[in-house]
Image (cartoon, helix red, strand yellow):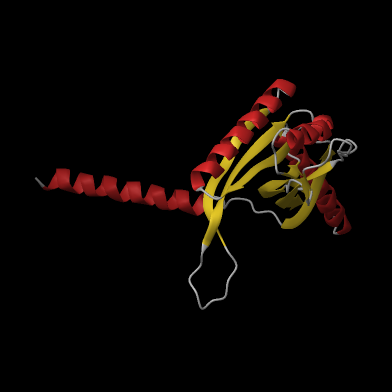
Amino acid sequence: MRRPLLSNLLLLALWFSCLAATGQTAEPPATFPTIAVEAEGKVTAVPDLALLTLEVETKAPQAEAAAQENSRRADGLLKALKQGFPEDQVKTLGYRLSPVYAANDKSSPPEIKGYQAVHRFQVKVKGPARLGAIIDLALKSGASGVSGPVWPHSRLEDLQREAAVAALERARRLAEALAQAQGLKIKGVEKISTGLQYHPYRAGGEAMRMGAAAPPTPIEVGEEEIKASVQVVFQLTP
């Protein structure tokens, strides 16, 4: 009965000794010096989209009258835009019907003198060169005010990738210059992270209703910058 137990103990001891021997002969993973750099890349592009905000505002002594007049003018505005520029997209941003209070001193309760209805639309213009014509048509067709434009890009994701690649290339050139100064070379990338920076430009101001003799509204479409930053840790080798 003792021999099988003794044999098992011997086998177990042999197994542990093999494990210990393997651990003693295993080589630790190779480590390389590193360098961390930050860089920014950017691309420029002319926007191929524009966002305009149109506002239809009406006032009347009664809430229903203000709402009805607003509905009539908003409907005329939508019809004019869809007929004149069917390729553009129009959607409602918000609608508000609220009382208008008379100015008085704080000793008396506020007095309602009428009601105001405001309907705000957003027009997504696929041809920014037509912005001036759209603004003029909107003001002639019931819009009380126009704000914008905001300049987005239909290819924004592609442009952001291009900016990130440019940032990475710049980071590598910087790392190579620093490594060369220390007699080293770039072996590879250990870690990389990126951040995108894009703030669509919004033109300030508001264009109000103009007379029939007013000249066409001039709109200048310029280039926009799309930026990306990267933080890269490069491995170095002699």
Horizontally, is 144 left or right of 181 in the view? left
Q: Does 158 sit above or below residue 7?
A: above
Q: Residue furthest bottom?
A: 107
Q: Position of residue 87 (x, y in %)?
A: 71, 22
Q: Position of residue 102 (x, y in %)?
A: 58, 64
From this viewpoint, is residue 44 visible?
A: yes
Picture quadrant of residue 159:
top right
Q: Residue furthest left?
A: 1
Q: Residue at x 76, y 56 (%)?
A: 37
Q: Position of residue 44 (x, y in %)?
A: 84, 40
Q: Position of residue 165 (x, y in %)?
A: 76, 40
Comparing 199 with 191, the one in front is 199
Q: Residue at x 84, y 57 (%)?
A: 178
Horizontally, is 96 left or right of 48 in the view? left
- What quarter of the picture does the N terminus occupy? top left
Q: Residue at x 89, y 36 (%)?
A: 213
Q: How many marks?
A: 0
From this viewpoint, is residue 161 visible?
A: no
Comparing 95 with 9, the one in front is 95
Q: Residue at x 72, y 36 (%)?
A: 156
Comparing 59 with 184, the one in front is 59
Q: Does 33 sit above or below residue 78?
A: below
